Image: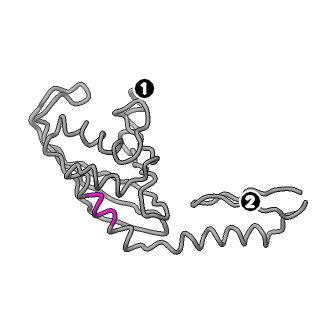
Amino acid sequence: MKNLLVIGALGFSILNSGDVFGTEEVMSVMEQQSSKLESFDIIRIKEQMVRFNEMINKADMKLANELIAEDAPFYTPAFPEAVYGGKGYLSLVFWLRKSFPDVQWQIEEMIAEKNKVAVSWICRGTHTGDDFMGISQTGKTFSARFMNIYTFNESYKITSDTAAEGMIAILGALKG
C-alpha cells in the first residue's frame, strides 16, 4: 500500500488508498484543507493586528505572548539567527528602541484573506539613542514604509512574518 502526503497551508494529510491515487482523493483532501482556511474570521485577524500594533508600540510582553505563537520564527539583519515567539519579536523592538527611543508603528492599510493579512506600516522615530548599525547618533527623524505579510494558525496566533525587502535587498546585493 502506498501513502500519499498532501501538504497544505495548515498542515498535511496522508492518504492510504492502495497503489493508485485518483484525482478525486487528492482533490478531496485539498478541499478539506482549503475549507479550514476559508473558515478563518477575517475581522478577527484584523483585530489581532490592531492588538499587535499596540503590542509593538507599548513593548507589551504579555500581549506579545498572546498574539504570537511560541515557535514562530522572525528573521532580521539585526541578528545572525532567527528569534522566536513573542519574546523574540520584542527583542527586535527593544534593539530598535536603543537607537530610536520614540519609535512608533502605525498601520496604514490591511488586506486579509484566509489565514493571512498583508499590512502596510509607517514607522517613525528619532535617532537620539545609541549608534544604529554603525551610524552615530544624529538626532534626525525618520519615517519609513514597511510591508509585511503575517500568517495565523487556528488559534489566531501569528506563526510567521514575511517582510518585503525592497530597496534594502537591492542595496545589500550591490554592497555585498
Q: In which quarter of the image is the N terminus?
A: bottom right
In the image, which disc is placed on residue 14?
Answer: 2
Observer-side mark, 1 or 2, equals: 2
Q: In which quarter of the image is residue 84?
A: top left
Residue at image point 18% right, 35% down:
99
Magenta highlight: main SS: helix
Q: Eyeballing the image, is 2 above or below 136?
A: below
Where is residue 156? Give x, y as percent: 43, 64
Q: In which quarter of the image is residue 74?
A: top left
Q: Mark 1 points at which residue?
A: 176
Left-right relation of 27 to 173:
right
Q: Eyeballing the image, is 99 above or below 118?
A: above
Left-right relation of 113 to 95:
right
Left-right relation of 90 to 73:
left
The secondary structure type at the circle numbered 2 is strand
Residue at image point 66% right, 72% down:
31
Earlier-in-chain disc, 1 versus 2: 2
Question: How far is mark 1 from mark 2, CA to CA?
Answer: 43 Å
The answer to if 52 sits in the magenta stretch is yes
- The front one of 45 and 167 is 45
Crowding near the residue tagged with mark 2, few <14, some 14–19, many ≥20 C-alpha atoms within 10 Å: few
The answer to if 11 sits in the magenta stretch is no
Where is residue 134? Give x, y as percent: 24, 24
Where is residue 79? Give x, y as percent: 37, 32
Q: Which amino acid does label 2 sit on?
A: Ile
Question: Bounds of the magenta span?
Answer: 48-53
Q: What residue type is labelled 1?
A: Gly
In the image, which disc is placed on residue 101?
Answer: none
Where is residue 129? Give x, y as percent: 13, 33
- The front one of 13 and 134 is 13
